[in-house]
Amino acid sequence: MNRGWTGRGPWMIAATSAGADWRIALAGLAAATEAPVAAVVIGTTVPDDDPARPFLAGVLEVAETARLPLDRVRDLAEGMSRSYELVLVAADAGLLLPVGEGGWTLVDLAVAMGAPVVVVTGPGPDAAHHTSLVVDALHGRNLSAAVVTIGDVEESALPLPPAGRIPAAALSATPGSAATDDPASPPETIPGVAETPSEDGRFAEAAEWFEPMLRVAPQPATPVLDVTEGARKPVSGKRFVLGLLGVFVITVLMACGLGWCGSEPIYSAHIDYTGPVEPTVRPYTPHPSTYVPPSRPRPPSTAACPENAGAITPTRPDAATSQRVNRAWQRIEKWLATKAPASARGLRPPAGAKRIDELQRRMSVAFPADLVASLRRHDGVAPGARFDLPPFFSPTSLDEILGDWRSTCTVLAGDAGSWPGEDWWHRQFVPFASAGDGGCLLVDQRPGGHGRVGEFYPEDGTDFARWPASVTELLEGTATALETGRPYDGRYRPTVGGDGLLDWEII
C-alpha cells in the first residue's frame, strides 16, 4: 500500500459533490502532464467533445459495471498503468456509492490498486465539510489524498492546503479555445503538449495550476542489469510498451472468456502510442499538500458519541405499535411478492430482540418504538439486493446502523470545532436507511425529537422538512404509493425493471 504520493499512475479522481466537475480536473491534470496520460472511466464514457479528450493518449471506457467484479476492473486499470506514465481513474459515481458486482465502490477500487486519490472540490458553503468527510474516509483506509479546487474555494477551512487550483474560467469556453463558437479563432497551444487542432485553449496554462507533485514529466530510460552477462543494457521503450499492451490484450481476452463477448460490449479501449515509455523508479518526496495517513489515529468516534455511557433502558415496542408497523410491512411485502419479487427476496429476516437491546446500549441511545418494531420485522436488506424506501434509501441492518453512526461520529470528533451546529449531526441521531453515497435517513432521538425522520447528507447536514414524523408513517406512505401507483410525496413514482427490482422514478 502506498503511504505517500506516487509519481506514476494509477491515480483516482474523486469529486466531493455534483458541483465539483471531475471531468474538468481530469482535463487539467492531463493537460499539465508532459508524459503520456491515459484515462480509465467507470460507468460512463469520454465522448469526442469531452475537454480531456485532446490530452489523452489512451482511454479505457468501462461503461457497464454491474457484471464486473472488483478484481477484474482493477486488472484492467493496472494493465493500462503498465503502458502509460500516468493513468487517471474516474467515474460519475460518488466515492462510497456501490458501482459493480457485489457492491464494490470506488474507494474499494482505490484500495485494491493502492492508488492515491485526487479529491476535487468546488465552491459553496459546505465544500470544507464534504471535503473533510472524503479525506477522512480515505484516511480510514490508509490512502493518500491531495485536494484540487475548482473556482473560488475558502482554502483556510479545507483539511489540506490545495495541491491544485483550477480557475472558474476553465468551466466555460474562452476566446481562442476549441470550444469557442468562432471557427476562425485558432486553438491555443499548451506547453509540453504537441499542438493539435482539437486542443482546448481553456487549459493552455494548466501546468501553472498544479503543484509539481501533480505534474508528471517523462522520465529517461532506466538501465536494467543483465544478470547472465553482468552487463547493463538499455530497455527498448517501444518493446516495453508493446509487451505490456500484449498483457493488456490478454487481460481483455480473459474477460471475454468469462462469457461477456457474446453480448453487447461493456468496455472499449482507445490506445495511441505516443513515444517511448520506460520503466522508472521515482522517489517520493513529502509535500504539505499531500495527505499521508498519520502514525497516530485521529480521535475515535467515542470522543463525540460515547458508547455504553450510562443506564439506557432499551425501547420495547408495545402491541399497538408493533401491530401498526407489521401491517405496513405486510402491505409492502405483498406488493413486492407480486410485482417486484427480486426486491422481496432481498428483505432480511428479523433482528433478534436481544441484539436490538444491545445496540441501543452500545450507542447510548434509546431507539423509537416503531424503529425497533421495524427491525424486528426485517434486519435491513441483504447485500447485493435492492429494496429502497423512496426514493433511494435502503433499510440497513443492525451492524450497518452501528457502522454508519460511528463513521459520522468519527468525523464529528475530529473536526468538532468546524461544524455549523448539532443539526449537521448529533450523537442521538440513529441512521436506519442508506443512500449508498454518504447520505442516509435517520430518526431524531434528541429531547423533543420524538423519533421524527430526517435526511442527512455530508454536504448539507440534516433536514427534517420533507419527511414524516415517524418511521411508521414512512412505511405506511411507502405501502400506499406501491399499492396505488401514486407518487410518494408527489415526487417519487414506484416502477419495476425487467430484473424484478423496485425502483423509484423522480417526477
Image (cartoon, rainbow, N blue to C red):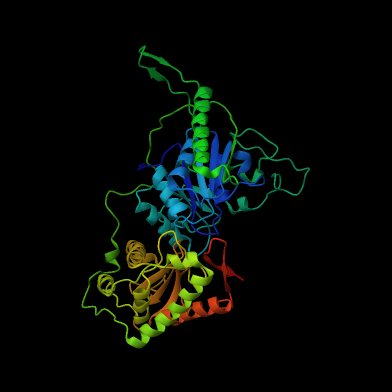
Q: Position of residue 406 (x, y in %)?
A: 32, 64
Residue located farthest toward the front when viewing the structure as drawn: 338
Q: Position of residue 100 (x, y in %)?
A: 48, 52
Q: Position of residue 370 (x, y in %)?
A: 37, 80
Q: Quadrant of the C terminus?
A: bottom right
Q: Nearer the viewer, residue 67 or 445?
A: 67
Above or below — where is 392 with respect to 69? Answer: below
Q: Is residue 350 left or right of residue 33?
A: left
Above or below — where is 376 with respect to 183? Answer: below
Q: Nearer the viewer, residue 38 or 433?
A: 433
Residue located farthest toward the right when viewing the structure as drawn: 184
Residue located farthest toward the top when viewing the structure as drawn: 229
Look at the image and tell me whether residue 212 can be seen.
no
At a point 58% along the width and 74% down the height, the residue shown is 491
At a point 55% along the width and 34% down the height, the residue shown is 36
Above or below — where is 256 with respect to 307? Answer: above
Q: Is residue 392 left or right of residue 192?
A: left
Q: Nearer the viewer, residue 269 or 183?
A: 269
Look at the image and tell me whether residue 172 can be seen.
yes
Q: Position of residue 161 (x, y in %)?
A: 43, 51
Q: Quadrant of the N terminus?
A: top left
